[in-house]
Each structure stands twice: as C-alpha cells, then as structure tokens.
Amino acid sequence: MSELVSPPLRAGIIALIGRANVGKSSLLNAILGEKVSIVSPIAQTTRNVVRGIHTEARGQLVFHDTPGIHKAVGDLGRVMNRMARSAAVGADVAMLVLDASQPPREEDCGWMKRLHREATPLVIAVNKMDVAGASAEPFCAAWEAERPADAVERPAPIWCEVSAATGQGLEALTAILFEQVPEGPLLFPDDMLSDFPRKLAIADVIREKLFGVLREELPHAIAVWVEQLDEESDPWQVTATIFVQKHSQKGIVIGEKGRLLRKVRREAEAELATWFDKPIKVELWVKVEAKWDRNFWLLKKLGYTQ
C-alpha cells in the first residue's frame, strides 16, 4: 500500500492595496482570525505597513496591510502614500481590495491598471458584499472599459467577492492566494501572528481608542508614541504620549475633568489585556507638538518612515 504524500508547502508575501477605508485592515483581521491591524470608520486609520501572518497546513501567507491611498497633506500623507505605492515591490501577489458598497472611483481604476502592468500576479478582492445593493459588476465593467492595451499579454486578474464582516468568500480567497504564492518553506515561525513591533502595536491600539471617542473631530492631528513598556512588572506598565498640534486640541483629548482620556485609557487597557493575555496598566500624557506630521525625525520615531 503506497503512502499518502502531502502536497508541498507554499509561502509568499501578499501586498494588500487600495484606497482609504475599503476595509483592508478588517479583511486582514478576518483572514487571520485575530486582530493585528486597527480598524475604525475613519479613513487613513492605518499609518504603518502592518505585517500579518497566516500559517496552516498548506503553508504560510504573509500579508502587508498598507495605508490607504488618499489626497496627501503634509509629510505624513506623502509618506503614507509612498508606502502604499511601493507595497507591491517584492511581493509575490498584489491583492487589490475594492469597496462593493460604492461605485468605482478614479483611484480604483487607476490601481487596477497600474497593478496589472506589474509582473506580480493580481488578485482583486471585492469587499463589503454583505452591504445591501453591493455589487462587483461595476468594477468588472470598469476594468473591461479601461484595461491597458497590453492586458492580453499578461494573466488576467483573479476576482473574488468577499465580506470581512460576515466571512463570505474568505475560504475561496485564501485558496486562491495559496495557489498564487510559490512553493517553499515557511518565512516565519508557525506560531507568529505578526512581526509588527510591540510598542508600535500598543500605540496603534491607543490611537484606535482615541479615534473611537473623537470621531471626525481631530483624529488626523493625533499621534501616539509608547515611551516605556515594562514587561517584567505585573501588570505590564505602559507609558505613552499623545501628540497633538494645538493647545486647544490638548483640552479636547483630555476632556472635561479628564473623562475622555480616562475612557481611552480604560478601553486601551481592556483590549491590550485581551491581545497579550496579561493585565496591562496604561499611563497617558498629552503633549503639544506643532506640525508633528511635518517633522521627519518624529515621523521616523513613530515608525511612519524609514
């Protein structure tokens, strides 16, 4: 009786690309089954390239979740756009995420044409198919109308309809991605979910909680830096600075009698305790740093540029 032979492992890097707020981070978290990238209804939430790692019997998919392309304002906006545009360089698969709940935009069509010109295989994930009235047809029609003249010389994009919210199509999408990445050994240890630096991940959680309470009031004027992380203490001790650009913004972030800042601290502590399975104590300070988003050295410190 012959022995069953397991198929060879496959492993590769997937660049998640698309305009702001199409659900790239939500889709990544849904595929991984755990949260590695912060999510909010506010566009441009992701500021770094976050790496999430999905490992299973078929092999390993390493996802780069990039900032959404948007109209850049200041050095921070330009840095975010540059990171997003360079994401496909060196990747094994480019995965363009589109928002099926809205008609195609100029940026969507531009990305389809741009990525199709690259040698990297292109997978197009049409997200938010759970939303009433959502459809992939307008995007397919836009592709047919605007595809490059040399499109016949390259493999056609692989389309997949998905919903990060409900899980629709995620198994099919994962299977497609494994088919596209090369055979080879795992790129990271099989128990690693992300290699995103811990301090930056904690800062992102705090920033997400600020986004949740401030909404559209001033989120893009805010940055968070973890000054200290003591993993030897019980609970872990985190000291973080929240940067704002104006003194008036400092008062908004602190809130009346400090209520807003306390709410952010409590929510961050609760989520971080879940992330790390340990009690976490967070201390927050608010500092005015005018034009921090135009300060190259501060952007480097915050992990927004290399």
Image (spheres, rainbow, N blue to C red):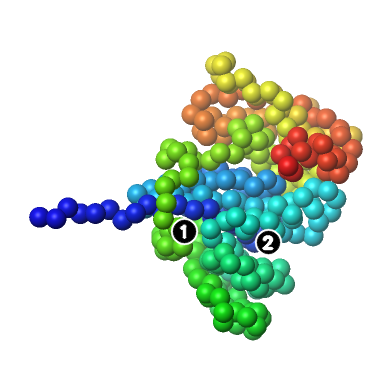
Name the residue rendered at 73%, 42% in the picture: 306
Neighbor class of circle 2 (other Cα within 10 Å; few <14, some 14-19, many 20+) is many
Residue pushed farthest top? 233
Q: Secondary structure at mark 2?
A: loop
Q: In the rendered view, would you say 74 is above or below 259?
A: below
Question: In the image, what residue type sits under mark 1?
Answer: Val
User: Which quadrant of the figure has residue 136?
Assistant: bottom right
Instruction: Give the total of numbered labels.
Output: 2
Residue pushed farthest left? 1
Label 1: which residue?
Answer: 181
Mark 1 or 2: the one toward you: 1
Name the residue rendered at 56%, 39% in the picture: 195
- Image coordinates for residue 272, horizontal then vertical, percent: 57, 32
Residue 232 shown left or right of residue 238 in the figure: left
- Image coordinates for residue 293, horizontal then vertical, percent: 83, 43
Name the residue rendered at 62%, 58% in the picture: 88
Evaluate whether residue 33 shows in this view: no
User: Which quadrant of the figure has residue 119?
Assistant: bottom right
Which badge, 1 or 2, comes first in the chain's sequence?
2
Question: In the image, what residue type sits under mark 2?
Answer: Arg
Name the residue rendered at 65%, 83% in the picture: 149
Neighbor class of circle 1 (other Cα within 10 Å; few <14, some 14-19, many 20+) is many
Residue 74 shown left or right of residue 146 in the figure: right
Q: Are marks 1 and 2 in contact (CB under 8 Å)?
A: no
Mark number displayed over residue 19: 2
Q: Secondary structure at mark 1?
A: loop
Q: Classify the position of the N terminus by image quarter.
A: bottom left
Q: In the rendered view, would you say 295 is above or below 64?
A: above
Find the distance from the CA under tag 1 to the CA under tag 2. 24 Å
- Image coordinates for residue 106, horizontal then vertical, percent: 72, 72
- Image coordinates for residue 85, horizontal then vertical, percent: 70, 58
Q: Nearer the viewer, residue 230 or 115?
A: 115
